[in-house]
Amino acid sequence: MKGLIFSVKRYSVHDGPGIRVTFFMKGCPLACKWCHNPEGISPLPENMERVSRIGAGEIRRQEKIGKYYQIEDVLRILEKESIFIGQSGGGITFSGGEPLFQPDFLLEALKACRAGGYHTAVDTSAYSPARDFRAIIPYTNLFLFDIKHLDDSRHFEFTGVSNAGIIENFDTLLQEGADIYARIPVIPGFNDSQDHLRRLKAFLNDRKSSSLKMICLLPYHRPGSSKYGKLGIPLEMNGLKPPSEKRMNELKEYFSDLGIRVKTGG
Ligand code: SF4
């Protein structure tokens, strides 16, 4: 079985505990207006133009985005990094795009990694059929679960999909006692109003349990706008300013009294 992956990041320290290898899987059913990995959205391999400058000149070449990996390839990469992974309490993270957009490959890869003794994490928008989502729970040590907006119409407007199934999948994880880091991308003007922050806090408070290990507040950062141009995708939130460090610290403080560990960044 093979999966389409557009990037492999070794020595990753923001995608779960310890030092990890993160596989970025291609294909995502969402179209978030702020997405900083637009090359992960299409489920097919594609070409992107790379420009390298040499003195006053430049070289343009087409780079292929997306390569097929067998599960054995994934294990081989992990094996090479196994000393760092083992010593740091790390593991493997499947991210994207949306890893559940390739549900069969993801499930088999998670099974194989767990059989190999690796800690597994899935970084997900959780916009996935409940059946696929439930299938991976027994093989996933940690879910990095994005919560973007609690208002369905606002969620739809900025991501192109409803949040109803996402919230159901969140509640399924809680019922199953899975470990979760709730990841909230902080997107100025989209989800950082006082009213929405209050709703988020109440939502998390209602769901407080031993499953909810951490709240991660992820500051918006500008996507490489050149990536958008090279892929021919319009960047709608061009010009949006990232939240300041002070603002992120205020938000951290705001969520801290829930009694759940809060951190800014992955
Ligand atoms: S869910 Fe993630 S990968 Fe998919 S469009 Fe949104 S930000 Fe991009």
Image (cartoon, rainbow, N blue to C red):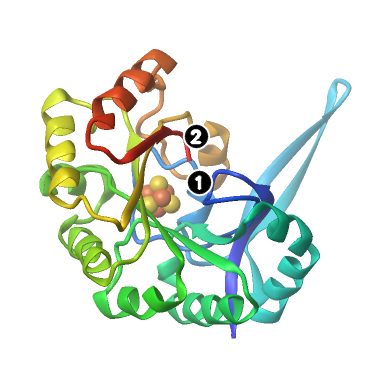
Mark with earlier residue (2, 1): 1
Does residue 24 show up? yes
Amino acid type, residue under disc 2 in the picture: Pro
Task: Name the quarter where the N terminus is drawn.
Answer: bottom right
- 181 lies above or below 140: above
User: Pointer 2: what residue?
Assistant: 223
Estimate the x, y position of residue 194 in percent, counting from the top left. 15, 24
Q: For residue 103, which quarter of the picture?
A: bottom left
Mark 2 neighbour class, 10 Å CA radius: few under 14, some 14 to 19, many 20 or more: some
Q: Quick check: is the Cβ at mark 1 less than 8 Å away from ligand 1? A: yes
Identified at 67% across, 45% down, the residue is: 49
Q: For residue 87, which quarter of the picture?
A: bottom right
Q: Nearer the viewer, residue 215 or 226?
A: 215
Q: In this rendering, would 11 be left or right of 106?
A: right
Q: Identify the element where label 1 is drawn.
A: loop
On residue 263, the disc is: none
Q: Identify the element where label 2 is drawn.
A: loop
Amino acid type, residue under disc 1 in the picture: Asn
Mark 1 neighbour class, 10 Å CA radius: few under 14, some 14 to 19, many 20 or more: some
Q: For residue 132, which quarter of the picture?
A: bottom left
Identified at 41% across, 69% down, the residue is: 100
User: Pointer 1: what residue?
Assistant: 37
Q: In this rendering, would 30 be left or right of 242?
A: left
Disc tally is 2
Identified at 35% across, 34% down, the residue is: 236
Estimate the x, y position of residue 31 in percent, counting from the top left. 34, 50
Estimate the x, y position of residue 260 in percent, counting from the top left. 30, 41
